[in-house]
Structure formats: structure tokens, C-alpha cells
Amino acid sequence: MTSLPHAETSVDRTPYPPSRAWLVGICLWPAFLAAGIATLLFFSGIDPETLRLQTVPNWEISRTAGYSIGFLMFWAVAALSSAVSVLLARPPRA
């Protein structure tokens, strides 16, 4: 009896543990998406200029810089969360 090519079982060829580049991608890409959503939600109700005037009035930055700083802060928090999740999901060392 011959075996059909599509009837073969698929085998995952990804090496385990994944390389550092994969781990960085696994952490940063979902964090980027989460930071984008958090930025949209946060800045839909809060103006960066008003936030700047209430927190650090002597610091002169543009609205665009405020949006950028907010996005990077959200990205850092989400990346930290993703990194902790990857760290906790790893199997124990032998």
C-alpha cells in the first residue's frame, strides 16, 4: 500500500528551545499590538497637551511627542508582561 503525500503526519521542525531572536519576536510583536490598542484607547479620552500641563508644565514637547512617549511606555509595559509570560511558560531545565 502506498502512502499519499498529504496523508503523512506533519512534524513541527521548529527547534526547541527557540532561539533568542524568536523569543524577542514572540515578546515584542504582541506587545506592539497591545501598545497600539492601549494608545488608541488612552488618547481617545486624554489630550497629551492637557496631560503635560497638569504633570510637568515646564517641559515643552509637542502633541506628537506626547503620543510617541505614551506609545513607547505602553509598549514597554506590554513587552515586560510578554517576557514574563514566556519565562513562566518555559519547561524546567533538566
Image (cartoon, helix red, strand yellow):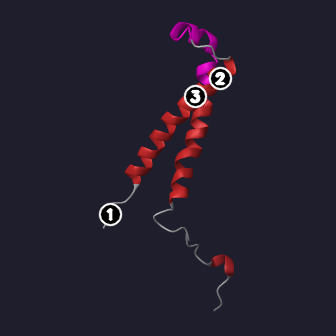
| Magenta-span inclusion, residue 52 | yes
Q: Horizontally, is 94 left or right of 84 in the view?
A: left
Tell me the quarter of the picture where residue 36 sits: top right
Tell me the element at label 2: helix
Question: Quarter-wise, where is residue 90 in the image?
Answer: bottom left
What residue did someone put label 2 on? 65
N-terminal of the two: label 2 or label 1?
2
Find the distance from the CA under tag 3 to the CA under tag 1: 35 Å
Q: Position of residue 39 (x, y in %)?
A: 61, 26
Instruction: Name the residue tied to disc 3.
Output: 38
Residue 47 visible to the viewer = no
Binning the other alpha carbons within 10 Å of mark 1 as few (below 14), some (14 to 19) or many (20 upward) gives: few
Q: Is residue 78 magenta?
A: no
The segment highlighted magenta reads 41-58
The residue closer to the viewer here, 23 or 13, is: 23
Given the image, on which type of amino acid does mark 3 rest?
A: Ala
Q: Disc 1 on helix, strand or loop?
A: loop
